[in-house]
């Protein structure tokens, strides 16, 4: 029987009413069962993932995408742990806040409620299948998950874990739909189903996100790319700066919270750049350097205007010496993608000014950009990172998958 995305969306809309009515304890039991199934079904999941990885390599998928695709026992355990962390969080729906008595005598408040049906369109990253499902379930939403063809076997194996959990509690399987058809036509049709889908979250390369943003008839959460900056201030502890640079650039290059641009205050450039050059040479990092820093690096290429906008997702980085703090701010404001920016400084006032002035979704002082992640920031996991400000900004957890409605209490009050 052929798959119909329109039918799946209607079924998800109907199922969303069931998950929205579940209480906190029931949702938590469901999440615990999903985490348990992930561990119990490690063998089939890894077997399916190996098929995807082999196909990805044979088709010439770039190394960053392959890295995001790979699962092993450790990664599966981390996915299960994230589900349990989400389970342990406070229920984001149902609470009433901001109660106030109006002159008319009515009491007015706001109740947090699910969004309804959320669609995820994503590439590689099979962990997103579970992260997105768990966050949507915690927030009382149904979810439609359309992964890329490169992760299809993995996603379907993970979907089996969710199906078993839903069946165990007698819940509608359409609460979580993993689309088995990766044809582009299915995605195109999905983006037109505004009667049944409330929000689309694309997660992947810039091309995918721009395509969805430009063609969807449904509201879209956008995150085009992560051009993350590290600014080494004149008052920086240079050993801290070197450690943050090494961790942010070299620990895992294929992720959107890795560093792509290094800005160095000219007052400490002669001290810090040789340290940075030695460390990055050890890791084989390709350097795109400005004219004031290029002599500090062996084999560096002169940076172009395009380099300041680049998301390399590789062992590459752009380096620029800036005149002062204001010049660093100006550079970030000109080229930031709104993802994550870091200052290294021992000057408390300077650190706070950076945090106040920079408008990106995550702004840090003396901490690695690699912490810009839903799990590390206390969300358990993230369904995506929004770099637009409506309706969420930054890593999105369960609360970001809810909205608010007004509730009014009266005693037969009528309007005069």
Image (cartoon, rainbow, N blue to C red):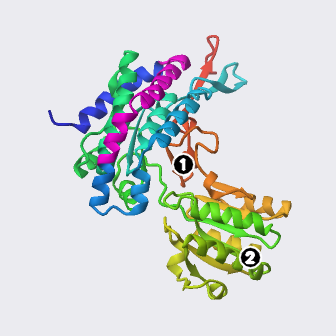
Residue at 80 percent of width and 73 percent of height: 234
Left or right: residue 264 versus residue 179 is: right
Please name whichever residue, 153 or 30, is drawn nearer the observer in this view of the structure: 153
Question: Is residue 366 depicted above or below 149 in this figure?
Answer: below
Q: Earlier in the sequence, mark 1 or mark 2?
A: 2
Q: Position of residue 339 (x, y in %)?
A: 58, 58
Please name whichever residue, 117 or 325, is drawn nearer the observer in this view of the structure: 325
Viewport quadrant of the N terminus: top left
Residue at 38 percent of width and 30 percent of height: 41
Q: Badge 2: few (under 14), some or many (20 or more) residues near its Cα, within 10 Å?
A: many
Q: Quadrant of residue 258?
A: bottom right
* Magenta part of the chain: 22-51
Quickly name the residue at label 2.
Answer: 272
Residue at 64 percent of width and 88 percent of height: 295
Left or right: residue 9 versus residue 40 is: left
Please name whichever residue, 259 or 55, is drawn nearer the observer in this view of the structure: 55
Is 298 inside the magenta-drawn segment?
no
Query: Which numbered marker is on residue 390?
Result: 1
Viewport quadrant of the C terminus: top right
Q: Is residue 242 shown to the viewer in this render?
A: yes
In what element is the residue under mark 2? helix
Residue at 38 percent of width and 29 percent of height: 161
Q: Badge 1: few (under 14), some or many (20 or more) residues near its Cα, within 10 Å?
A: few
């Amino acid at each position: 029987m052929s798959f119909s995305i329109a039918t799946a969306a209607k079924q998800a809309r109907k199922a969303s009413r069931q998950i929205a009515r579940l209480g906190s304890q029931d949702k938590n039991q469901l999440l615990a069962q999903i985490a348990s199934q992930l561990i119990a079904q490690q063998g089939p999941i890894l077997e399916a993932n190996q098929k995807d990885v082999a196909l990805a390599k044979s088709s010439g998928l770039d190394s960053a995408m392959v890295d995001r695709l790979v699962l092993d026992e450790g990664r599966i355990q981390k996915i299960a742990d994230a589900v349990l962390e989400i389970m342990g969080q406070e229920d984001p729906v149902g609470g009433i806040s901001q109660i106030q008595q109006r002159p008319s005598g009515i009491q007015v408040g706001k109740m947090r409620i699910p969004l309804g049906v959320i669609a995820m369109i994503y590439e590689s990253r099979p962990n997103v299948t579970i992260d997105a499902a768990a966050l949507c379930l915690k927030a009382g939403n149904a979810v439609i998950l359309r992964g890329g063809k490169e992760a299809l076997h993995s996603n379907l194996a993970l979907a089996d874990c969710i199906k078993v959990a839903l069946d165990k509690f007698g819940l509608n399987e359409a609460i979580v739909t993993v689309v088995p058809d990766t044809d582009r036509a299915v995605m195109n049709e999905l983006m037109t189903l505004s009667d049944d889908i409330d929000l689309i979250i694309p997660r992947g390369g810039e091309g995918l996100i721009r395509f969805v943003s430009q063609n969807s008839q449904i509201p879209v959460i956008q995150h085009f790319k992560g051009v993350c900056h590290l600014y080494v201030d004149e008052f920086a502890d240079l050993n801290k700066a070197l450690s943050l640079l090494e961790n942010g650039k070299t620990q895992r290059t294929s992720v959107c919270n890795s560093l792509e641009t290094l800005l160095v205050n000219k007052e400490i450039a002669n001290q810090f750049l040789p340290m940075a050059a030695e460390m990055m040479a050890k890791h084989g990092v390709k350097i795109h350097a400005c004219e004031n820093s290029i002599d500090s690096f062996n084999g560096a290429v002169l940076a172009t205007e395009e380099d300041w906008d680049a998301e390399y997702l590789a062992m590459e980085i752009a380096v620029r010496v800036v005149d002062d703090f204001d010049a660093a701010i100006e550079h970030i404001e000109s080229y930031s993608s709104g993802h994550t920016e870091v200052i290294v400084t021992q000057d408390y006032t300077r650190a706070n000014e950076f945090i106040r002035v920079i408008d990106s979704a995550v702004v840090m002082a003396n901490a690695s950009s690699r912490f810009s992640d839903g799990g590390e920031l206390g969300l358990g996991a993230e369904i995506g990172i929004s770099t637009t400000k409506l309706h969420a900004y930054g890593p999105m957890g369960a609360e970001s998958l809810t909205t608010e409605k007004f509730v009014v209490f009266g005693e037969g009050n009528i309007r005069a």
